[in-house]
Amino acid sequence: MIEPSPFDAGTAYVAVQRHKMDDFAPYIFKTSDFGKTWTTLTNGIPGGTYVHSVREDKKRKGLLYAGTESGVYFSLNDGVDWQSLQTNLPVCPVYDLYVHNDDLIAATHGRSFWILDDLSPLQSYKPEIASDEVHLYSPRPANRTMFGSGFGGGAGSGGAVGQNPPAGAVIYYSLRTAIKKPEAKKAGNQAPGDSGEPREAGASEAKAPPLALEILDSKGQVVRKYPAKPPATEEAPGDDEGFGRERERPLPSEAGLNRYVWDLRYEGSSRVPHSPLWAGNTDGPIAIPGTYQVRLTVQGKSYSAPLEIKSDPRITATQQDLEKQFDLLLKIRDRLTQTHDTINQIRDIRGQITALNKRLEGQPQAKAVAEAGKQLDKKMTEVEEVLVQTKAKSNQDVLNYPIRLNNYLAALGGVVASADGAPTQASYDVYEMLNKQLDEQLGKWKQILATDVPAYNDVVHKQDVPAIILAKPGEAAAGATE
């Protein structure tokens, strides 16, 4: 097989095989003078591994790929030295290779076609990178193309179903030494407020992680951050979508090359634990085509690289159409966040009232405090039941009970995001209608916070509730074993 160099008319590479003559040695030759002289280039390819094909990268001169009887090899120095590029490719003959759109396509014997997605780390690699403590590679442009996953998240489970490349921006970075992962919380340790007790000020604040990844827009504003800020309330898988939501993958922190995929989405809205949604979710909107920036922070030191998002070449929507869609989705996300934050506040206050009532059982202050809490809870419930369907606890409950404002907003977001294009006038009209209804309820909640919550606190204060209440004999031991 002959491979003419795309960079120099007088340069070509030739792969020769003689295995049918019982000669299984690898043979790769190079000429730089139109074939007058040839140089052997096989250092690093084991003896007995004969070569079927050789290709040169279309972007980096001297970056070569070789398909052999047992797999794929590559060279960063024009064939002077070769290294294995097997990764997860099974050991098999590779009859031909082809570089297309910065991907390496391998035609194997018996293993079908394999594709190594994104050659940009190899194309930009330099020997000095190996001595860097941290190196952030410039990501290749990302296409704003989302691969369908099928109803319920499954794209098919048959053995013949292939695997698509990652949907989003693929970000590579290398670490000279691995970063130790933080220890997981021990079972039984609860975050402040999990049991309904008041949280301590600053308890939810966590120190900066040793490894963080941020995506910034063209104005320098952070639109997505990994690891994400931990939720203020406990969440469970599938809390907010009818078919569950994939948990965020942790940032890889192994020594050597690491890869992470940004799904092109902005931060999502806040969520309400154990409150399912139907026909919508809390995901953030997909970023529009344009220029962005990747910022990697390791042990307090930051590294940046540019990132470009290109539009899906198959769609006809204009940039202005996508901007209109994005702007409306961002407004829906922010309003849904306000809705969910209010619901979580209501439930947090209710949890504190319940905890205090439990502490005061059998105490002289119990009746007055409980009555004040009952009046406050009644007003909070009136707002809560407009914002969220309180009877829906499982995914199918939303089929039995009418959805409320938060689900209307989420479902509207699902409609607006269902296709690449400008929102319809009907979508704008529905948004304005929901916006007014939400403002009315948030106004009521603001009034409750301004008058009813302070009134409840005054009752508790006047009852002179003790900070410590001694348990009755036998109750303390029973509570310690629970």
Image (cartoon, rainbow, N blue to C red):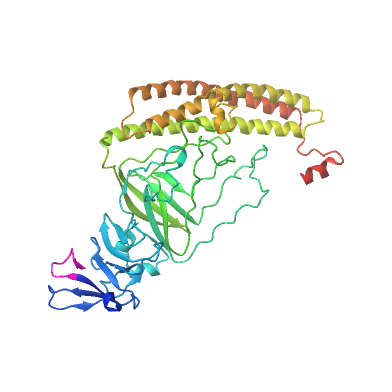
> In the picture, which quadrant includes the C terminus?
top right
Q: Does residue 275 appear anywhere in the picture? A: no
88 displayed left or right of 29: right
Q: Position of residue 39 (x, y in %)?
A: 21, 78
Residue 462 drawn in magenta? no
Q: Which residues are magenta?
A: 1-12
Q: Position of residue 236 (x, y in %)?
A: 57, 41
> In the picture, which quadrant includes the N terminus?
bottom left
Q: Position of residue 358 (x, y in %)?
A: 75, 33
Quadrant housing residue 172: bottom left
Quadrant housing residue 382: top right
**Residue at horizontal 49 percent and vertical 28 percent from the top:** 407
285 displayed left or right of 232: left
Q: Position of residue 105 (x, y in %)?
A: 30, 58
Q: Nearer the viewer, residue 309 or 303?
A: 309
**Residue at horizontal 26 percent and vertical 54 percent from the top:** 101
